[in-house]
Image: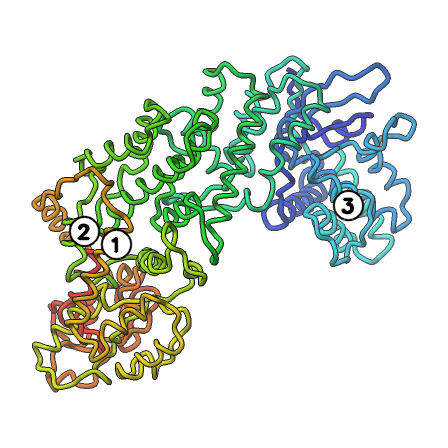
Amino acid sequence: MDTDVHSPKAIFHATTRLVVPLFQRPYVWSEEKQWAPLWEDITRLIDVIDHHNQAATHFLGAIVIQLVPTPLGSIQTWNVIDGQQRLTTLQLLLSALHNRLTRRGWDKLAGQIKSLIENSEDYRQTDEDKFKLWPTNRDRAGFIAAMNGNRDSNDQGATSRLEQGHSYFANAIDAWLGEDEEQAFARGRVLVAAVQDRLEIATIRLNADEDAQAIFETLNARGTPLSAADLIKNFVFQNLNTNPAAAEESYRKYWSQFEAEWWEEEVTSGRLKNPRSSLFLWQWLTTRTLEEFPIREVFRQFKYYVTTIDKDIADLLPQIRVAADRYQEIIRGAARPNGPLNREELFSYRIRLLDSEVARPLIIWLNEPEQADVPRADREKVLALLETWLVRRMLVKATSAGNNRFVLDVIRFLEDQPNTSLPDALAEYLTSNTTKVGYWPSDADIRSELTGTRAFNKYVRARLRMVLEALEDNRRGYPDGRQLAMGPISRGKGTVEHIMPQKWRKNWMADLTEDQQADRDSILHQLGNLTLVTQKLNSKVNNGAWSTKREFFRQYDDVMLTRDAVNLADGDWDETAIEQRTEELIGEILDIWPVPAGFTVANRDIETRTSDTEARRRAVVTIADLVTNEILPEGTRLRPTSQSSRWRGVTAKVTGEGKIAFNGTEYAYPSPAARAVTGTSSEPGWAWWSVAETGHTLNELRNDYLHMND
């Protein structure tokens, strides 16, 4: 190893090739974060040299390059282990400078720069030998276009990041040189000298037999961080025992797909965002090691895993590729809004809405080579069992803390079972669990939780819609019944709608006493009063009388869930009809997500659930919590709960930031807003304010939130 500080001239002037390995990530530097700051550093350096310190230099950072053995007579070649973003940017800057100098007719100055970006024709044996730097496959077309000056600096057609970078530097150089020819030439000479000789780069040169990977990992914290997928890619291809051509073929065949936009998209798992490729590798490695570890440690775990298996690293690539293709196929299939889904796709769709990405390793595990002989029907039963466990726990608001560990325990358990009996083994495992993090809610638990509860407020809207979609599809024969030609309902498109409207007092008042009105308010958000609509209702229909709404549903709505409700209440749609329908829908939910045949589960300890509820009630809740969870929509008008004439005409509004706006001031909590009205030193704000249209107090909505986040 040789370490020293070099100028760009010292690095690039010799006849040499700096090759970025094909497995490194593409060029990612940008104007805001790197190009503009670099140009500002250069112009500032020139100013310092002119006015303060003629010996001034500017440090650019470090690079690591490793010597590549080459045949006698070939150009000396180095692999770029670290610093390819920095080196590529320097080449774009130098090429742009050469281009601007040439256009102004300053050929001698331009010649000084040309020797830093191109090798002499006398030494070239291939077209690739032309450039001092040779980028990774993905960047080559853009790099060649930029370096050859195929576009004018003002050309808006520059699409690649490399061309954009070249254009940025060309324009910046032109602007800095100015229009006065004599002054511009003098500035050009200073710029050439500063760029060649006064920029400094710490250069680590490795011999061919030194461990480049270890140094690469140590330096990774600098610059734009590499993802887990980037680190694994570098590790794999650094350690392939093959020639460069074979390595490139392996990369193209088994790994290049991870650089597609779909794989590079950042997706959320829990509270973290990661590229989908990194998330997949984490989940895949979890199924291989059966160990729990955070995604930030996936690279370290991968390196350790490679040392524990009796398989060459090259043999892992086809296995990863097969798993990745299946992973992508399932997720993309699950994203289709229309048409039937297979069991894997349906499981994938539902766990996404349940925020249960931790369950995805089970799909991967079922598709690994060791489970190839598991019958397809058994695979589907295994997924249906875990989905039922997840949905039931969501319905009773069981804790999701520890789900990742529990799912891993499930896979470990299945790993030890014969492939011929996985469904029965899993059913026994799940239904016999009595722990807080693993118990299977019984039919009685579900009925107790859903009967009389305000489902519309209690559940996250997407999850509630998913349950209603399942109820609708069950009527249409999907996924396992006598399937109707109309197909399953469009997923994620329907709107959860109240049959009896939330603004029922306008057209549904009848002759109700105050107690009866309170009863109606309490039953309004129950499951039995909810349906899905596939087209937006206008306000006349939405809040209209039952006869108007019923006629609309009969003529225009194709949702069988709604039609059944219409047929259930051919007369009035009232509290009795809602309660009856709630019971019917609960029964269907228990059929869709059933306790496995032949198994029983114990009812959950009521005292445990009560103590959990009490703990929630001690939580601090803000208006923002209610807004975020769609319990209190932005723009909701509030009024004093008291009907005293003192407060007549007093109103406030809920803002999108989760505050109460009153008289030009915004309040995060109800009590300060109430005190602003009354002028007193103490007011119970949660009880003081009510929703103007429904009469619900904020305290009632607060309780809905606390119950929702059970």
Q: Judge the density around disc 3: few (<14), some (14-19), many (≥20) Cα neighbours within 10 Å.
A: many
Q: Are marks 2 and 1 in contact (CB under 8 Å)?
A: yes
Residue depicted at 55% across the width and 43% down the height: 264
Please, what secondary structure does the residue beneath circle 2 have?
helix
Residue 34 position in % (x across, y down)? 61, 44
Amino acid type of the residue tagged 1 in the rendering: Ile
> Is 541 displayed left or right of 339 in the figure?
left
Q: If you read the primary sequence from the N terminus, does the residue marked by circle 2 or circle 1 appear first?
A: 2
* Residue 431, picture quadrant: top left
Q: Which labelled disc corresponds to residue 446?
A: 2
* Residue 147, picture quadrant: top right
Residue 13 position in % (x across, y down)? 80, 29
Residue 231 position in % (x across, y down)? 54, 30
Mark 3 lies on residue: 146
> Is 76 displayed left or right of 323 in the figure?
right
Amino acid type of the residue tagged 3 in the rendering: Ala
Marks 3, 2: nearer the viewer: 2
Amino acid type of the residue tagged 2 in the rendering: Ile
Q: Judge the density around disc 1: few (<14), some (14-19), many (≥20) Cα neighbours within 10 Å.
A: many
Mark 1 lies on residue: 589
Q: Quadrant of the N terminus?
A: top right
